[in-house]
């Protein structure tokens, strides 16, 4: 009986459009009880769309004679890349009346053709205006769209565990479907499978294939997240789904409306170690929260603000951070050009310090250079390491020297990879792109490249 009463009360809240943060009341009529989620669905569902995308990929056939020394030349062309069209199905959410739509990168990010179908069966061509694989988000613009229904973005930092939510999308292509549940966790990082960097709202509302890019809405019909993936061994929904928080979506829309071609994040220029009990005790701290700075680039905005290795960061803009991924998320939603209030603990003293949110500086100049035909490795493209390249290529903060941007045909065949740092050529130390160009112009029968690859030294030897 108690469980039934709680259920009826929850349904009443949905009918009245009353937020869990507002005052609650008991059902006033049998009609309010009977309607259930219907009023909320009628309000929110028209802003959730189905997305049909075509993606052109390159596939290779394999000849049965490929390794045969007699027939290999006859069937050499058999293994050439061939275009293949794949269809992607997903969901999206309308955010503005003139047709700005948000979805997942893995749904539309590589699409050559996108078709969006609204709940009332209108169809629109769409184009991607901003996409980012790391965040698994994409912003679309519908062609010739106006006066469309849309959802408002809620401050996802105000979402609480236990709130009632609805997941709306197009699972398995069966048509728009609504499932209900609660917010079962917040600030989930690194727990879900997929392409995105993890920082999610967790829900037990069923999320299935095709729901990607759909809406997770609260009892007011406001968008609190974009459904993106599930945690499952079988591939089916087990009641552990993840949504990208609305505050990150808001920053994507802001940059898209400013005309950004690539999504940009503020650069921390640091790495950190999450706090645990032993580390907190060694530092004389009472609270086991935050992260200790373990590495700091000299050009980091935190270094400029006076931070040093060993400082502990506990909060960004009043929100607790316990890992580098949380730090990046909090800086990102603060926004480029703004200042974040960072809570620092040093020698037991707690301070609030303002740090400017800016992209990694492209200084000193990277001076990208592609080696020509006179080089021992024609087509090799190299650049001088700087903070912008460190951030873009995921290099260690301590990386210096020359990095490989494009291996080219010859070096690529020899095992050189994009992101390798060129340490030396034939025993000669390489510090600048000009050093590399000069030494690779000298004629020799043998070539040895000393590389740094993901923290490991690698030596490659070529016979020319």
Image (tube, rainbow, N blue to C red):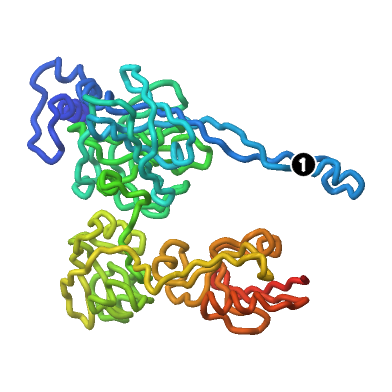
User: How far across and down, in percent of the image, does residue 195 sit?
Assistant: 46, 48
**Residue at position x 57%, y 68% from top?**
420
Q: Which residue is at the far top?
A: 31
Between 417 and 161, the residue placed more toward the observer is: 417
Between 49 and 200, the residue placed more toward the observer is: 49
Q: In this orientation, does residue 246 appear?
A: no
Q: How many marks?
A: 1
In which quadrant is the N terminus drawn?
Answer: top left
Q: Is residue 185 above or below residue 430?
A: above
Q: Which residue is mark 1?
A: 77
Give the structural element (helix, strand or loop) at label 1: helix
**Residue at position x 33%, y 28% from top?**
143
User: How far across and down, in percent of the image, does residue 238 sit?
Assistant: 44, 37
Q: Which residue is at the far right?
A: 70
Instruction: Give residue 333's quadrant in the image.
Output: bottom left
Between 338 and 439, the residue placed more toward the observer is: 439
Q: In this orientation, does residue 281 appear?
A: yes
């Amino acid at each position: 009986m108690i469980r039934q009463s709680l259920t009826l009360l929850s349904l009443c809240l949905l009918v009245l459009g009353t937020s869990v943060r507002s005052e609650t009341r008991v059902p006033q009529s049998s009609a309010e009880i009977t309607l259930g989620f219907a009023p909320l669905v009628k309000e929110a569902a028209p802003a959730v769309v189905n997305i049909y995308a075509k993606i052109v990929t390159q596939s290779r056939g394999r000849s049965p004679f490929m390794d045969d020394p007699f027939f290999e030349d006859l069937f050499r062309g058999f293994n050439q890349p061939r275009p293949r069209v794949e269809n992607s199905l997903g969901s999206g959410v309308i955010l503005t009346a003139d047709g700005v739509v948000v979805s997942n990168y893995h749904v539309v990010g590589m699409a050559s053709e996108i078709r969006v179908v609204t709940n009332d069966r209108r169809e629109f061509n769409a184009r991607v205006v901003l996409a980012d694989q790391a965040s698994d988000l994409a912003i679309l613009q519908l062609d010739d769209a106006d006066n469309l229904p849309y959802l408002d973005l809620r401050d996802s930092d105000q979402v609480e565990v236990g709130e009632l939510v609805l997941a709306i999308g197009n699972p398995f292509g069966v048509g728009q479907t609504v499932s209900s549940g609660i917010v079962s966790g917040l600030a989930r990082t690194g727990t879900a499978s997929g392409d995105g960097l993890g920082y999610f709202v967790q829900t037990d509302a069923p999320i299935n294939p095709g729901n990607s890019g759909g809406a997770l809405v609260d009892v007011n019909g406001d968008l609190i997240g974009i459904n993106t993936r599930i945690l499952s061994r079988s591939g089916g929904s087990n009641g552990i789904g993840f949504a990208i928080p609305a505050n990150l979506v808001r920053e994507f829309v802001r940059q898209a409306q400013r005309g950004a071609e690539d999504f940009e994040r503020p650069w921390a220029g640091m790495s950190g170690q999450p706090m645990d009990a032993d580390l907190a005790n060694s530092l004389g701290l009472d609270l086991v929260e935050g992260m200790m700075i373990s590495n700091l680039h000299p050009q980091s905005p935190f270094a400029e603000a006076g931070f040093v290795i060993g400082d502990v960061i506990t909060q960004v803009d009043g929100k607790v951070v316990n890992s580098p991924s949380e730090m990046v998320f909090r800086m990102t939603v603060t926004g480029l050009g703004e200042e974040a209030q960072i809570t620092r603990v040093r020698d037991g003293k707690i301070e609030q310090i303002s740090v400017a949110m800016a992209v990694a500086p492209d200084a000193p100049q990277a001076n990208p250079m592609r080696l020509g035909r006179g080089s021992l490795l024609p087509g090799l493209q190299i650049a001088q390491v700087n903070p912008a390249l460190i951030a873009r290529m995921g290099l260690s903060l301590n990386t210096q020297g020359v990095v490989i941007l494009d291996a080219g045909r010859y070096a690529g065949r020899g095992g050189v990879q994009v992101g390798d740092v060129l340490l030396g050529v034939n025993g000669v130390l390489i510090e600048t792109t000009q050093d590399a160009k000069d030494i690779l112009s000298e004629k020799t029968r043998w070539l040895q490249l000393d590389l740094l690859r993901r923290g490991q030294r690698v030596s490659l030897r070529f016979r020319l």
